[in-house]
Image (spheres, grey):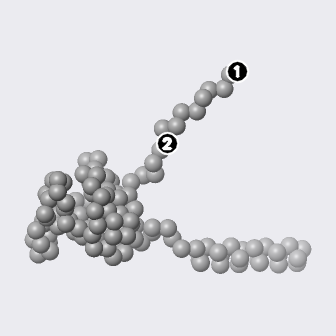
C-alpha cells in the first residue's frame, strides 16, 4: 500500500513538472492565423504577413504588436495597419496614415481562425 502511494506521488509530481515546463504554443504572441467577422483572413509569422487581400509582405513585429504598410494593389495601399494583441485569441486592428490618426480610427476586432478542416473525401468501403 505504501509503495502504491509512493508511485502515485512520484507520477503526480512528474506530471506537474512536465506541465509547468511546457511552453504554450502561440499563446501570447501575435503570430498565427486571424479571421475577421466579415470573412477576411490574415496570417502573421514573425515579421512576415499575408494581408487580408492575400499579398505577402513584411512589417514591424513584436510579440504583442504588429504594424505594416499596406502594399499596392491592396485596398488602402500606403496606409499603415496597427495591430495589438488583446489576449491569446483577440487582436485589435486599425488603419491610418500615422500612429496619432490610428488612435482616432475605428477599431476592428479579429479573432484566431478555427483550425482548418480537411476536405479529404475517403472512399467508402464495400460492405
Residue visible at 17% across and 53% down in the picture? 73
For this rendering, which residue is in front, 2 or 88? Answer: 88
Q: What residue occupies the far top of the structure in this picture? A: 127
Q: Which residue is mark 2?
A: 118
For this rendering, which residue is in front, 118 or 13? Answer: 118
Q: Is residue 63 above or below residue 117?
A: below
The picture places residue 71, in percent across and down from the top left corner, at 19, 60
How would you rate the neighbour count of disc 1 (Cα within 10 Å): few for under 14, some for 14-19, many for 20 or more?
A: few
Residue visible at 38% across and 58% down in the picture? 33
Is 119 on the left or on the right of 98, as rendered?
right
For this rendering, which residue is in front, 48 or 115? Answer: 48
Q: Which residue is mark 1?
A: 127
User: Which image quarter holds the C terminus?
Assistant: top right
The picture places residue 18, in percent across and down from the top left corner, at 64, 75
Residue visible at 25% across and 47% down in the picture? 38
Is 21 on the left or on the right of 93, as rendered?
right
At mark 2, the secondary structure is: loop
- Classify residue 69 by image quadrant: bottom left
Cα separation, mark 1 vs mark 2, equals: 25 Å
Q: Is residue 118 visible?
A: yes
The picture places residue 56, in percent across and down from the top left corner, at 30, 58
User: Which image quarter holds the N terminus?
Assistant: bottom right
Is 55 on the left or on the right of 100, as rendered?
right
- Classify residue 84 by image quadrant: bottom left
Q: Is residue 107 visible?
A: no
- Classify residue 9 by image quadrant: bottom right
At mark 1, the secondary structure is: loop
The disc, 1 or 2, on the residue closer to the chain's N-terminal end is 2
Amino acid at each position: 500500500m505504501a509503495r502504491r502511494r509512493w508511485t502515485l506521488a512520484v507520477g503526480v509530481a512528474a506530471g506537474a513538472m512536465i506541465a509547468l515546463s511546457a511552453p504554450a504554443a502561440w499563446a501570447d504572441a501575435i503570430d498565427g492565423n486571424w479571421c475577421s467577422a466579415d470573412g477576411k483572413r490574415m496570417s502573421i509569422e514573425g515579421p512576415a504577413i499575408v494581408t487580408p487581400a492575400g499579398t505577402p509582405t513584411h512589417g514591424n513585429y513584436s510579440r504583442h504588436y504588429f504594424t505594416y504598410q499596406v502594399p499596392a494593389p491592396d485596398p488602402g495601399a500606403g496606409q499603415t495597419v496597427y495591430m495589438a494583441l488583446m489576449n491569446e485569441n483577440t487582436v485589435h486592428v486599425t488603419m491610418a496614415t500615422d500612429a496619432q490618426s490610428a488612435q482616432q480610427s475605428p477599431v476592428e476586432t479579429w479573432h484566431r481562425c478555427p483550425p482548418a478542416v480537411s476536405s479529404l473525401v475517403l472512399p467508402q468501403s464495400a460492405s
